Image (cartoon, grey):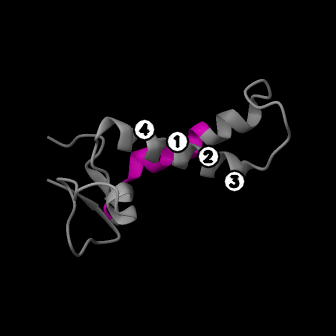
Amino acid sequence: MIGIHDVRLYNFALLDILGTFLLALISYYIPFIYKYESRYWVHVIAWFLLAILIHYLLGINTTGNYYLGISDKPTKFVDNPKFLWISS
């Protein structure tokens, strides 16, 4: 059975990436979350950094944290990934 983290883009879970961009879009358009004007890419970077920190604190091995050298290799990691693929 295929789960939501099985569709991968260069070892990254595609739906996690899309969800991060969606959260950034929502936080960009809701003015009471941030009290100052900022660009959309600032929100994207902030959400990715928050995701990295949360996964690190919870001890979840992710591809991003593995590439940053702060976690072990995730279970769905492959050494030579295709561009877009479904893990098993």
Q: CA distance from mark 4 to mark 3?
A: 20 Å
Q: Residues within 10 Å of mark 2 (few under 14, many from 20)?
A: few
Say whether residue 20 is magenta: yes
Q: Residues within 10 Å of mark 4 (few under 14, many from 20)?
A: few
- Which residue bears the numbered disc 4? 54
* Residue 12 visible in the current orientation: no
Q: Amino acid at mark 2?
A: Ala
Q: Earlier in the sequence, mark 1 or mark 3?
A: 3
Q: CA distance from mark 3 to mark 2?
A: 8 Å
Q: Secondary structure at mark 2?
A: helix
Quarter occupied by the N terminus:
top left
Mark 2 and 1 residues: CB-CB less than 8 Å, in contact? Answer: yes
Q: Amino acid at mark 1?
A: Leu
Q: Is residue 54 left or right of residue 47?
A: left
Residue beneath the point at 46% across and 50% down: 17
- Which residue bears the numbered disc 1? 50
Against 30, residue 68 (above or below) is below
- Which residue bears the numbered disc 2? 46
Q: Earlier in the sequence, mark 4 or mark 3?
A: 3
Q: Could you say which disc has been placed on residue 58 in the image?
A: none
Q: CA distance from mark 2 to mark 1?
A: 6 Å
Q: Position of residue 8 (x, y in %)?
A: 32, 57
Mark 1 and 4 residues: CB-CB less than 8 Å, in contact? Answer: yes
Q: Residues within 10 Å of mark 3 (few under 14, many from 20)?
A: few
Q: Nearer the viewer, residue 49 or 4?
A: 49
The magenta segment: 11-23
Q: Could you say which disc has been placed on residue 41 in the image?
A: 3
